[in-house]
Every structure is written in structure tokens, then in C-alpha cells.
Amino acid sequence: MHATKTIPIVMANVGDPVAAGFVASLARPGGNVTGLSNLSPELGTKRLEILKEVFPKLSRVAVLWNPDAHGPAIKELENVAPFLRVELRPADVRVIKDIDTAFETASKAQANGLITLPNSMLVDQRAQVVSLASKNRLPAIYPDRETAEAGGLMAYGPNTNDNFRRAAAYVDKILKGTKAADLPVEQPMKFEFVVNLKTAKQLVLTIPPNVLVRADKVIR
């Protein structure tokens, strides 16, 4: 966006493009950017609900977040946390070196659960995040299946492969003459819930059968 205000830019996996300032609104982007939003703020509450359902005794949840990008998502979580009788323990993660510090903060806060908000850096560093969650014996739920496949306990979020396929349709329309400003930002149509039973076994945790049957993928 800093480089051009004229060449169309198609998003495929952005949390809240309005809050980030990428578009004026979902219905009317208004500039040279359009594409797909992954419903980041709203899905955080769904992940918290799943974590509480699986672990009813959950009382303090560490949240790995970037204050520069996740303001709306934290507000959503803060709104629902009292109803779930859960206290949030936010831990700032802006750069890689913050990851270790965030888990130290979670440990000092006596967190007994973990949520990470959508963050490409955390996905890239998923091996470190999963290792620290295991070391601190924190049942966790992540926004991307890649982290669950790398050893994370659970993941719930949009099917990003489907988002990228749909993004190609935007490119097609733009190449045929439609302006990016006239193409509404769309939201995910496919979601996936992944459970890693190998990790559950390592943490000596039990995933209820009624939760397992809802999983799109179970790693055994």
C-alpha cells in the first residue's frame, strides 16, 4: 500500500482489514485493496469457548497478541471471558524475542491455558511456540492448522487454502476490468477444527468424545 495507490492489491488472509486501515469498509473497500478477511476478532471468542468446553476448570488464559494489530480481537475476548468465568492474561508479542518473554509472563500469571491470536510470525515460529506450551504444560488452541500439525494441541480457524483459491477469483475479475474499490471484501466460507491427540497424550489430557467428533482432522 505504501508502494502504490493504483495497482490493485488482493488480500487472501487478513484478520481485520478495516481496523488495520486497509479498506474503508468490507462492503465498499474504496481504494486499491480488496480480497478476503479471516474474521480474526470474532474467531478468538470461538477458540476461547472451545478451550473452556474441553477444559471446564480453565480459569486463567494467556493470550499471545500484538497490541499494534489485535486491539479488536482482545476486546472481543474481554467481552466474553466473564461469561466463561475465565481471566485473560495478555502477553505482548511483537518480535521473535518476545515469545520467550511472553511465556515467562504467562507462567508468572499462573495461566492454565493458552490462546494465540493470528500472527504470521507466530506461525513461522510455531515449533518454538509449541515447545514452550508443552514445557509449561499449557493446553492451547491456535488459529491455524499448521501449528496443530507441528504439535499444537488444537486449532480452529478459516481454511486458508480455500481463501487463497477464492482470492484467485478476485484477480480474475480485476484483470477483466473490475476495480478493486468495487469488489466487496468477503469472509471465510470454510472453517477447520484440528485436534492433536498425540499432544493430548503427552500432556496427559483427555479430549471429550463430543469434541472429537466435531474435528475435521484428528492427529493420532
Image (cartoon, rainbow, N blue to C red):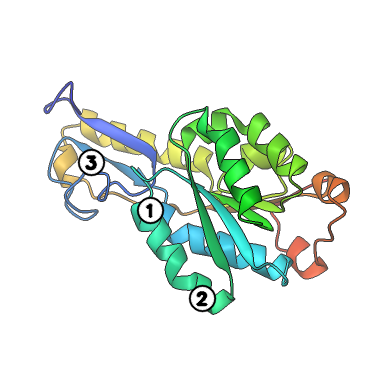
- The image shows residue 92 at horizontal and vertical percentages of 46, 43
Q: CA distance from mark 1 to mark 2?
A: 28 Å
- The residue lying toward the viewer, choosing from 125 and 159, is 125
Callout 1: 10 Å neighbours few (<14), some, many (20+)?
A: some
Q: Is residue 9 visible?
A: yes
Q: Position of residue 186 (x, y in %)?
A: 33, 51
- Left or right, residue 70 beside residue 34: right
Structural crowding at the residue carrying mark 3, measured as other residues with C-alpha within 10 Å and reported as few (<14), some (14–19) or many (≥20): many
Q: Which mark is residue 82?
A: 2
Foreground disc of the pair 1, 2: 2
Give amino acid for label 1: Gln
- The residue that mark 3 highlights is 22
Quadrant housing residue 51: bottom right
Type of the residue with mark 3: Phe
Kindly report which numbered mark, 1 or 3, lies closer to the viewer in this rendering. 3
Q: Which residue is mark 1?
A: 187
Q: Residue at x 62, y 42 (%)?
A: 104
Where residue 73 appears, x then y in whole percent?
41, 56
- Horizontal side of residue 131 vs 184, given as left or right: right
Q: Which image quadrant is residue 6 in? A: top left
Left or right of 203? Residue 105 is left
| Cα distance between the residues tagged 3 and 2 | 32 Å
